[in-house]
Amino acid sequence: MRLNLLRATPMAIGAWLAASAWGAEFPAPLPPDRVQKVETLPAKYPTTWAWLNYAGDRIELRNVGSDSREVKAQLQARDSSTLLVAEKRPEVYVADTVWSRGFRGVRTDFITVYDTHTLNPIGEIVLPGGKRALITAQEGMFTFTDEQRMAVVFDFTPASSVTIVDLVNRKVLGDVEIPGCSLVYPTGARGFSTLCSSGNLLSVRLDAKGAVAGRSETKAFNPLDTDPLFTASTLVGGVRYFPSLHGRIQPVDMRGDDAKVLPDWPLVTAADADGQWRPSGWQIVAGDEQKLLYVLMQSGAHEGTHKDPGNEVWVFNTATKTRVKRLRLVRPGSSISLSHATEPLLLVQAGQILDVYDAREGALIRSMDLPGLHTRMQIEPLR
């Protein structure tokens, strides 16, 4: 650089001298910025990974089984986005809703199909009618049926219905009205069940084209006025277990075309009554391959605290219907789930932290920050 000192201002001369001194002190140029590295994911994800639905701006694939705490991938999502991970095909599905002007304008409900290796979008299914239920991420909004060939989407306008979708051919097959009923749980070879306001369970059987092939209803078993069931549940050996607000467990056999209500049994014994223990939280129950049931419990519970975090996880043997273990949490949690690894991990969302416990012994293994989590989380471990 040349500078005419006769014509230069004092400020320009000072800048030139400073630049010359800096160049002498740091003669090597700065290296170019590193280009972000993009990798593909394995054909089968490890069972120590889990999907974390933040019920807000993203769905995250996280390695919960390592102290490295890596985020393996992210999917863009919103408050009511719901995830399904296929085991029959290398695909991931996210049901979502957007508006053309941010939070107003033309509404579009749709399912995005992602490739599991790259997480690139490879397909989209637009859902008609603007009917998809916009409830923060939870179980029962979006589920597989028919060996994962079809999916069922819960709709609420506030009339209740479901949309039947062919995931293989990427098209909507039709809709089914379910008046007075909410959420969907897969039943039998090709069908779903839904909890109804009359206290019963409606089962709908579908044919190969997604049309209704039959319906059945159970007798009323859900005492909505005195001890209603949570809509959160877990499937163990073909039986779905629903906790109740006051501390029962209600099993429902989902293996046949028609759901069968089995006898309920208590979670809270007389000896625990003084502690006022009740199930509580958001994702409050999980099950494992040994047919053990894990339930998030809160002490000092009373009317209106059923969504508050719980401070213990109780473990029950579903065969003997007895509690076999109590796991005390280092901090109260709102959502729990179990990994399907050989040595299962108990995952507990506690505010903006994910605590990872040894599910057998109850010892805390590691804690992970959940930056940006503002509400509740839905946890989906890998199988």
Image (cartoon, rainbow, N blue to C red):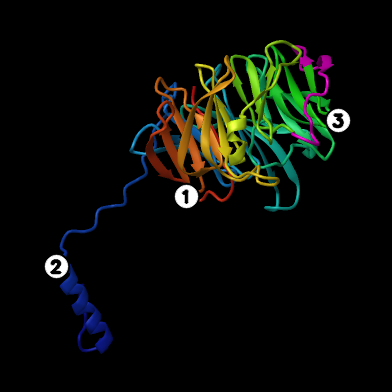
Crowd band around label 1 with a 10 angstrom C-alpha radius: few (<14), some (14–19), many (20+): few
Dot 1 or dot 2, earlier in sequence: 2
Q: What span is colored magenta in the figure?
A: 205-227
Instruction: Point out which mark residue 179 bears.
Output: 3
The answer to whether 236 is drawn above or below residue 156 in the figure is above
User: Mark 2 — residue?
Assistant: 25
Give the spatial CA distance, label 1 vs label 2: 40 Å
Give the spatial CA distance, label 1 vs label 3: 39 Å
Instruction: Point out which mark residue 185 bears.
Output: none
Dot 1 or dot 3, earlier in sequence: 3
The picture places residue 29, in percent across and down from the top left corner, at: 21, 59
Q: Secondary structure at mark 3?
A: loop
The residue depicted at 37 percent of the width and 39 percent of the height is 366
The picture places residue 378, in percent across and down from the top left corner, at: 57, 37
The residue depicted at 84 percent of the width and 32 percent of the height is 180
The residue depicted at 81 percent of the width and 18 percent of the height is 218
Amino acid tagged 3 = Pro
Res 200 visible: yes
Res 281 visible: no
Amino acid tagged 1 = Pro
Q: Secondary structure at mark 2?
A: helix
Which one is in front in this view, the residue at disc 3 or the one at disc 2?
A: 3
In the image, 370 versus 113, the foreground residue is 370
Crowd band around label 2 with a 10 angstrom C-alpha radius: few (<14), some (14–19), many (20+): few
The residue depicted at 78 percent of the width and 15 percent of the height is 205
In the image, 242 versus 207, the foreground residue is 242
290 horizontally vs 111: left or right: left
Marks 1,2: beta carbons within 8 A: no
User: Mark 1 — residue?
Assistant: 371
The answer to whether 374 is drawn above or below residue 92 in the figure is below
The picture places residue 278, in percent across and down from the top left corner, at: 62, 37
In the image, 340 versus 189, the foreground residue is 340
